[in-house]
Amino acid sequence: MRVLILGIDGYIGWPLALHLLDRGNEVSGMDNFYTRKRVKEVHSNSAIRIGSMKNRIRKVKEQTGKEISFIRGDVSDPDLMYAAVKATRPECVIHLAEQRSAPYSMIGLKQASETLQKNMIGTINLVYALKDHSPNCHLIKLGTMGEYGTPNIDIPEGFFDVEYMGRRDYLPFPRNAGSWYHWSKVHDSNNLMFANKVWGIPVTDVMQGVVYGTRTDALTRHRSSTRFDIDEVWGTALNRFCAQAVAGLPITPYGKGGQTRGFLSLDDSIQCLTIAAENPPDAGEYRVFNQFDDYYSVMDLAMEVKRIFDQKHTNPAVIQNVPNPRIEKEAHYYNPEMKKLRELGYRPRRSLQDGISEMIKDLERHKKTILSLKDVIMPRTEWKESRGLS
Amino acid sequence: MRVLILGIDGYIGWPLALHLLDRGNEVSGMDNFYTRKRVKEVHSNSAIRIGSMKNRIRKVKEQTGKEISFIRGDVSDPDLMYAAVKATRPECVIHLAEQRSAPYSMIGLKQASETLQKNMIGTINLVYALKDHSPNCHLIKLGTMGEYGTPNIDIPEGFFDVEYMGRRDYLPFPRNAGSWYHWSKVHDSNNLMFANKVWGIPVTDVMQGVVYGTRTDALTRHRSSTRFDIDEVWGTALNRFCAQAVAGLPITPYGKGGQTRGFLSLDDSIQCLTIAAENPPDAGEYRVFNQFDDYYSVMDLAMEVKRIFDQKHTNPAVIQNVPNPRIEKEAHYYNPEMKKLRELGYRPRRSLQDGISEMIKDLERHKKTILSLKDVIMPRTEWKESRGLS
C-alpha cells in the first residue's frame, strides 16, 4: 500500500513510518519540522536525541535498501499539499501534521490563532487535494479523546442514539474540549464529517488518548529513536512524570490529580494506526475510533511511577501536587467506549507497568539532558492568563 | 449604553445602528466593506442602491445631531480589533462582521479557507480584546439556525438534557451544518463557549433564521436604505424569490423545495438583537438564542410569493424548481424551539404576508437593476464541484 504520513518527523510519525515500511508498504512523508522549532521557542528540547530526517532516511536505506521519500513542507500551504498528493498518489494518508500541544495553544492570542488556523487549514487543504486527485484514498486523521471533554454520561465512538422529546436520531456526540488545541481537533472532526458527506472521502477519525513511552518494536529493530518531550508545553503527563522521577525532581500532578484520561503506549498507538490503515472504512464512510488502552486518573499514574521507580532506587520519588494551570474538572465520571479497534484485532502489547519500567530505564541514560531542562518542566502556561497582544 | 457594531455596513448592521441610536445608545461601528467588494467579485451588486458609509453617517448627523463613530478595518487583524475595543470601550459588542454566504464558502478551496479562517480569527481576536480591556462587556454574536442542520428530533436553544445508557447530563446540542460557512459559525459557537468557560465573558450566541425584507421602522424614519442582495451567492431564498417575481423571472426553489427553515423579517431581527442587548446575560453566562419568527418550507414560500404577486399583477409569477446545487435533505422533520426571546418580550411585528407585499412594492422601483443582474441569479455554485487549486 502507498502510505503518505503527514508529520513523519514527530513522536508518532517516525516510529509509524518504520513500522509500516517493515510491513511492506511504500512510505512517503511530509514535515515542516515545526515541533523541533517550536520546542526550542520555549527553551526546551527532546530529552532523547534524534537524528536529522536526512540521516534517519539514509540509515533506513542502509539497513533495508528501502527509500522513504520525503517532502519538506507545511500542509497549510495548499500548493505544497496538492504537490505532495500528486507526487505520492497515496492509497492511505495518515495526517499527524498538526500543532499538538494544548499549553502551546494557550500561551497567547498569537499561538491560539496559529493553532486554530494552521490545524484547520492543513486538514482542509488535504481534503481538497484528495477529492481532486485521489478520491478513494483513505484518510486517517489524528484527533484526541480530549474532544469529548468529561461528560457525565458514557462516551461512545463519535456518534450516539439520542432520544429527545419522544423522538429519536443517531447524531454526532457533543464535543466539549478544554483548550484551543483540543477545539482545533473538534473543528477538524466537524470539517471532515462534512467533507465526507459532500465528496464521500473515506475517513477514519481517531480520538486518541495520551500516548506514553520511549520504545516500539520498529524503533528497536532499526536501532532508532523518536523524540521525547518532557517540558510543561510539549511533554504529556506520564512521560513527564517518568522524567521527573529519573531526575530526582518531584512528580507533579496538576491540582488534585483526579482528572481521568485514556492512555496507551506508543507501540500500541502504532499498532492501532496500522490496524486502521489495513482495515479501511467502506466507500464513502466516515468512522470514529476511540483509541486508548485503558483509562487512569493522573494521580494514580503518579503513584504508579513512584511505586515502580522506588522498587529499584534508594532515593524514593516524591509526588507534589501543584496548582492546576488548566480549567478542568479534577473529579468526574469517565467511561469512554473502545470497541471498534478491538473488533478489528487490537490487543494491547505493552502493559502500563512495563511501559513505565522501560521509560525509567531508557531515561536514566538521558538524566543530564533532563536536568538541563528542569526550569521548563514546572507548569507556567496558565489558561486564565493567556496573553493578548504582546 | 455604548454599543460597538462589527459589520455596521451590512444588511442588518446599518438598520440596527439606526435603531440603537434612536433608542438613545452611543453607537460605534467597524467594517472593512468586505461584502461590497466580494459581491462585485461575482459580478453582482445590491439591488437597492446604498450610500457610502461617509454619506450615511453625515446624513444621520444632519438628521439627529448624533455622531456614529466609525473605524474602517478588518476584525481578523488583532491590532485593529484591540484598537477598536480600546477606543470605544463598549458595554455591548454586536458581532456581525463575518463572511455570511454559504455559496461563497463553497466556490472553492480559496473561499473555503478564507471563510473558515477569517470568521474564526475575527471572533478569537474579539474575545481576547474583550477579556483584556472590557471583561464585563456583553458579546452578542450572530450565528445561524443552520448550525443545527435538520436532525430528526426537536432542536432546543443550544443545550439539551441527554439521557444515555442510564445516566444524564445537560450538553451542547450536536451541530450538523451544511456548508463551510455554516461550519464556521459552529466553530465560533464552540470557541465562544470555551472563552466563556475560561474568562467568563458574557455571551449571547444567536442562532438566526433566514432574514428577509427591505424595510425597518428605523430605515423609514431616517429615509435610509440597506443593501439587498438577490444573486445566487449573496442573496437568500425569500428575498431572491421576490426579486425574481418582480423582474418576470421564474421563482426557483432548489430541488423539491421541501427544505424547511426558520425565517424572520429584517425589522424583527433588529427587534430581537435589541432585546438581547437590553437584557444581557448574567455575569459569566453563555446563552444561546434561537432567533426566528416562524418556519416554512422553501416551496411554501415560493407559492406565497406567487400568490401575493399575482393578486396585483396581470402576468402571473412562474415557479420553476431547479436542480439543487447543495447537499441537503429536501424532506425532513423540523421543530426548533424559540422561547427565550419571547420570554424577554419579542413579538413579531411584521407578518410574512406584509413583508412579501412590501418587498414586491419596494423592488418594483429597482426592476431595471434586478434585470441587469439576471445572469447571476440562477444557481451556479455546486457543493460537489467546489474548486481546488485554480
Image (cartoon, coloured by chain):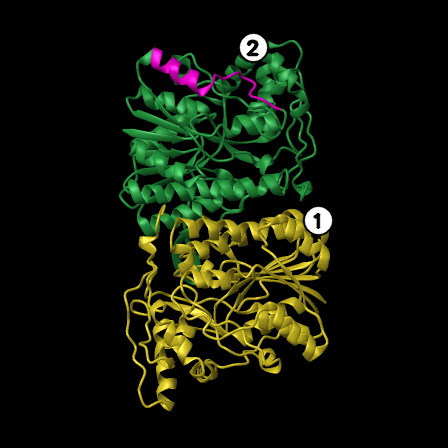
Chain colours: A yellow, B green
Establish if B248 lies above or below A284. above
Judged left or right of residue A291, residue A255 is left
As for residue B50 lying within the magenta part, the answer is: yes
- Structural crowding at the residue carrying mark 2, measured as other residues with C-alpha within 10 Å and reported as few (<14), some (14–19) or many (≥20): few
- Image: A160 above or below B132: below
User: Would you name the residue on which mark 2 appears?
Assistant: B365
Q: Name the amino acid type tagged 1.
A: Asp
Query: SS at mark 2?
Result: loop
Q: Is residue A87 left or right of residue A172?
A: right
Stretch in magenta: B44-62
Q: Given this view, does label 2 or label 1 mark the residue nearer the observer? A: 1
The residue at the point 34 percent across, 79 percent down is A303
Q: Quadrant of the N terminus of chain B?
A: top left
Tell me: B304 left or right of A20. left
Find disc 1 in the rendering and name its residue.
A132
Q: Position of residue B267 (x, y in %)?
A: 42, 23
Nearer the observer, B332 or B363: B363
